[in-house]
Image: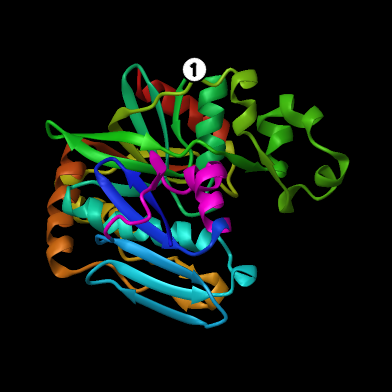
Amino acid sequence: MQKINISCGSVNVLLATNSNEIIKFFLHNRENVRETIPGVEVERIDDSSEMKEPYIIYMDSSENEVKIDEKTNKAIIKFPIQKLFFPDLVYLVLSMMAKELNKENKYFVHCSIVEKNGKGIMIIGDPGSGKTTLSLYLSMNKNFKFVCNDRALLEFLDEVPYATAGTLETCIRVGVIPQFFPMLIGKIDKERLENPWNSRFYLDPEFDNLGINIKSSTPINYVLFTLTYPTTASQTRLEKYDNSKRQDVSILKTMSCFSQYIRADNNMLISMEYPFPSFDNEELACKRLKDVKRFVNATEMYSARGDIKSLADMIDELVV
């Protein structure tokens, strides 16, 4: 079998397979891996290398078999390559890595991050809440630097929370472009403009032309729990959580963010309709809770609701 090593910082997941297509996917279509795993590196290793946990063995086979051992962090999958949805394996790697990172007090967080004047802002919200649109608008109109779009690697450096890597591959719904990014209209074909809310536009190759400056890492000073749709300028609010009175709210919200990928809450092997097991356990959860409290104490947390342009003005004033 051929083998590759997939790494994020000091954490590695080994993948062994009898499929050339899988090897090519991870080695040569890296944008599909980078848009899921922040700071990922992929390299071929000697086929005779020992399989150390965590690892995934994928066999192109007529069998339909999945064995995922969340306790030892290893998986064996047998499934026909022509029916396999390749990102399934990427998300499995993500969850396995999340468990190993938790052991090192590091976490994958679903968020967008921007930075200005040395101050990092983590924008958290459900899919469709406007995280990407808000972070891009701040980067293109308020001189913020763009750190990540969808997932960040968070760790503590001298008790300061830092985003040390992030995913940059970015897409936005065509429907937001006329209002917030009119300079992009000429780049969109007519068919997508006719169905704007069901169409997406990929931005990553356009970053240089848009004047967006990238920052590879930043301390996190502010956290915004965000919802921007549907709202108006008059409904816009940027309200600071009073942690001296309601720290429990901040802890619960943050714990959920830090736990998402370790618990594999939203992940499954789509090809095989097989839900991922939780990679969590009591020891990791207790360690994580201590880090969540450190994170809450080290940052200012806000509820950010309202119109994107008005909210961007308020956020800009926050980092002066």
Of residues 246 and 182, the one nearer the viewer is 182
Residue at 12 percent of width and 31 percent of height: 158
Above or below — where is 178 with respect to 276?
A: above
User: Magenta segment range?
Assistant: 21-50
What residue would you read off at disc 1? 143
The quarter of the displayed image where residue 278 is located: bottom left
Residue at 16 percent of width and 61 percent of height: 284
Above or below — where is 298 with respect to 11?
A: above
Q: Residues within 10 Å of mark 1 (few under 14, many from 20)?
A: some
Q: List the single residue furthest toward the right.
A: 190
The quarter of the displayed image where residue 210 is located: top right
From the top left corner, tell me how far across and down residue 28 is, in percent.
56, 43
Of residues 120 and 16, the one nearer the viewer is 16
Q: Is residue 306 visible?
A: no
Residue at 55 percent of width and 60 percent of height: 86
Which amino acid type is marked by label 1? Asn
Q: Secondary structure at mark 1?
A: loop
Give the quadrant of the N terminus: bottom left
Give the quadrant of the C terminus: top left
In the rendered structure, the answer to whether residue 300 lies left or right of residue 33 reads left
In the rendered structure, the answer to whether residue 71 lies left or right of residue 55 reads left
From the top left corner, tell me how far across and down residue 153 is, in percent.
32, 42
In the rendered structure, the answer to whether residue 12 lies left or right of residue 293 reads right
From the top left corner, tell me how far across and down residue 66 is, in percent.
43, 78
From the top left corner, tell me how far across and down residue 189 is, in percent.
84, 38
